[in-house]
Image: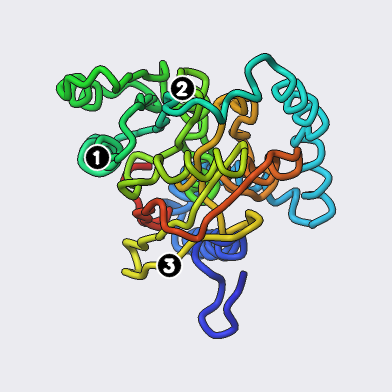
Amino acid sequence: MTDPVTGPTPGSLEWAVADLAARMQRLEDAVNESAAVQLGFRDETREWWRETDGLLRHLELRSQAQIESARRERDGIEDLRAALDGFRMSPGYDALWDETEPLVTVRIASYNRTRELVEVALASVLQQTYQRLEIVVVNDGPNPATRAALEGLGDPRVRYFELPERAAYPAHPHLRWMVAGSPAMNEAARRAEGAWIAPLDDDDEFAADHIERLLELARAERAELVYGALIQRDRTEGVDRVIFSDPPAAGGFSFQSTLYLSGLRFFEYDTESWRVDEPGDWNLARRMVAAGVRMSSTRDVHAFMNMVRFDKRDDA
């Protein structure tokens, strides 16, 4: 998206392309300075190609028709509908809304943010008005500091796991932002033992009665996924805004404000959703809607997203 006054919006595809064009121009200017610089240029060029390979492949899908075709190919909506039908026919499905105090799994993917994980995310979970819960944290690769901090809590409700190594992501920061953490999110959902899953990022937080109120809404509506509004705190610009849409829409929905049946965990994050120009959260939500998951919502604020723009983060 391009603003007619200020130019491309930071984080947009147009912004990323303009950034690449500017970098290429600087490299071309350097070529003309001296033979020594030209030798350095070759090294920088190799690095540039390595870093932007994901974006260049991504640009092959720039036309909307190509993007839509790629989405249909990757989505597997018919298979998801069949799996959803099978879940609804499974023993015990109809009783899921009748249990008065079901176990709820809070699933958190983390990477290199031990302090925020403990002081912000986990603190908001442990202060919930609903207390029959477990917390499954999956770190995106080994992290001794995070392991030690969580073990030091001494809370048996907190279960900690690590991926053997950090997942491979595109080198370009915009594309990496689209899918960062998605393998750990999928793993955490697989390890959930609760009847319901409440997703949370490691630097975000729940409202105190988030789980309690969404359980009440799910029971009242017999919904498979329920969600509320979310306050996005932009730490880069110092601006807060409300994230909410009904039905879910791109830019108006985030999983931090949701609660959904764990039987829906066959809906997984597409760890390469950048290939179809979608952040992982929206890609997953869109496929859930398309497959027919029963959803209900409230405009009440249920969570807080502490956002730092992808190109300003120091934990990439």
In what quadrant of the picture does the N terminus appear? Answer: bottom right
The answer to whether marks 2 and 3 mark residues whose Cβ atoms lie closer than 8 Å is: no
In the picture, the disc for residue 176 is none
Whether 61 is drawn above or below 191: the answer is below
Which quarter of the picture shows residue 275?
top right
Provide the residue designation for mark 2: 194
> Which of the two residues, 311 or 70, is positioned nearer the viewer here?
70
Residue in the picture at 75% in, 36% down: 75
- Disc 3, SS: strand
Q: Is residue 13 above or below residue 274?
A: below
Mark 2 and mark 1 residues within 8 Å of each other at the beta carbon: no
Image quadrant holding the C terminus, namely top left
Residue type at numbered disc 1: Gln
Q: In this figure, which residue is indicated by the disc labeled 3?
A: 241
Categorize mark 3 by other alpha carbons within 10 Å: few (<14), some (14-19), many (20+): few
The residue pinned by badge 1 equals 127
Which mark is in front, 3 or 1? 1
Q: Earlier in the sequence, mark 2 or mark 3?
A: 2
Please indicate, yes or no, whether residue 100 appears anywhere in the rendered image: yes
Q: Secondary structure at mark 2?
A: loop
* x 59%, y 83%: residue: 4
User: Is label 1 in a helix, a strand or a loop?
Assistant: loop
Q: Is residue 33 left or right of residue 268?
A: left
Where residue 263 appears, as percent x and y from the top left, is: 60, 24
Q: Looking at the picture, which amino acid does disc 2 mark?
A: Gly
The picture places residue 36, in percent across and down from the top left corner, at 41, 51
